[in-house]
Amino acid sequence: MEKIVILTGAGISAESGLGTFRDAGGLWEQHRIEDVASPEGFARDPALVQRFYNARRAAAAEATPNPAHIALARLQAEYPGSVTLITQNVDGLHEAAGSTGVLHMHGALSGALCPACGHRWEAPAEMAVAHPCPACGTKRARPDIVWFGEMPYHMDEILTQLEACSYFVAIGTSGQVYPAAGFVRQADAAGAHTLELNLEASAGRSAFAEARQGRASDLVPLWVA
Ligand SMILES: CC(C)NC(=O)[C@H](Cc1c[nH]c2ccccc12)NC(=O)[C@H](CCCC/N=C(/NCCC(=O)O)S[C@H]1O[C@H](COP(=O)(O)OP(=O)(O)OC[C@H]2O[C@@H](n3cnc4c(N)ncnc43)[C@H](O)[C@@H]2O)[C@@H](O)[C@H]1O)NC(=O)OCc1ccccc1
């Protein structure tokens, strides 16, 4: 039985109305993404960073999954235990489409984290600048998102699945951010067939055995079928 590992990026949610990083030219309100998605940025200007994630949380709440998300949920249901779904995205569209056990390696907009005591809880729609932690009362709570310079989540599980996979597919990702951009080489080293499904050739295109260009909502249902 194939052991399939799937990595998704912002491109799979583009047709659900959630802009990609590249669409914005890597900017938000004229701020470099690295400046609003980093611990340094949060220390420097927590109001700006909370506004950034409150806006994205509001947009994600309005968005609905598209045929690409739905096709992956169907694949998981058809082959229980054979599909590992890793996402760089912080929206909840994979789960909204019915996917389970999604590895959010960069966290999720639905989570809040206290940097003082490590407590995690469901994020409210709007987080305040000095947001109090319900466990320790410290007023420095942040979105439970992995920022630049921080260690991604679920790396042990991800590396285990990459070493055991026979088929690796990257969907809607530009292959510019590590360690996610290196997964294709780890899968290839494990002997897996590697496939890129993307609107344009990604920065890692040369590492893939196969690539199909187009919109995720067309390519993914065709690939799953
Ligand atoms: C900029 C880059 C050079 N910097 C990094 O990679 C850094 C530093 C670094 C580490 N190792 C390196 C090695 C070399 C160089 C640099 C580094 N990495 C880190 O800091 C990482 C942490 C990075 C995570 C940061 N947080 C994010 N997200 C959460 C926040 C938030 O969301 O706000 S990253 C964020 O940006 C990335 C954006 O990329 P994509 O999702 O691919 O989106 P993009 O817009 O770029 O592209 C969209 C693609 O879709 C396509 N598309 C568009 N529409 C469609 C469509 N309709 N259909 C199909 N495709 C479509 C487009 O053509 C395009 O190709 C995603 O990962 C996303 O999650 N942490 C770390 O390294 O910790 C230590 C460590 C690690 C491992 C082990 C030990 C220690």
Image (tube, rainbow, N blue to C red):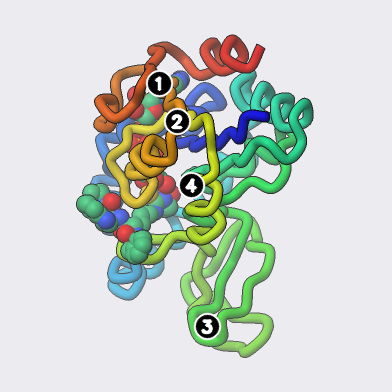
Disc nearer the start of the sequence (3/4): 3
Percent of width and height locating residue 35: 27, 58
On whether ligand 1 comes within 8 Å of the CB at mark 2, the answer is no
The reply to whether the C-beta atoms of the residues labelled 3 and 2 are less than 8 Å apart is: no
Going by the numbered disc 2, the residue's amino acid type is Ala
Give the label on residue 170, or none.
2
Q: Which is in the foreground here, disc 1 or disc 4?
A: 4
Q: Secondary structure at mark 4?
A: helix
Q: Residue visible at 28% across and 70% down?
A: 40
User: Going by the image, does 100 lie left or right of 222?
Assistant: right
The reply to whether the C-beta atoms of the residues labelled 1 and 4 are less than 8 Å apart is: no
Going by the numbered disc 1, the residue's amino acid type is Asn
Disc nearer the start of the sequence (2/1): 2
Q: Residues within 10 Å of mark 1 (few under 14, many from 20)?
A: many
On whether ligand 1 comes within 8 Å of the CB at mark 1, the answer is yes
Q: Which residue lies under the disc numbered 1?
A: 198
Disc nearer the start of the sequence (1/3): 3
Going by the numbered disc 3, the residue's amino acid type is Lys
Q: Residues within 10 Å of mark 3 (few under 14, many from 20)?
A: some
Q: CA distance from mark 1 to mark 3?
A: 41 Å
Q: Residue visible at 52% across and 13% down?
A: 219
Q: Residues within 10 Å of mark 2 (few under 14, many from 20)?
A: many
Percent of width and height locating residue 132: 58, 80
Q: Which residue lies under the disc numbered 3?
A: 139
Going by the numbered disc 4, the residue's amino acid type is Glu
Q: Which residue lies under the disc numbered 4?
A: 163
The reply to whether the C-beta atoms of the residues labelled 2 and 1 are less than 8 Å apart is: yes
Vertical comparison of 122 with 62: above or below: below
Q: CA distance from mark 1 to mark 4?
A: 24 Å
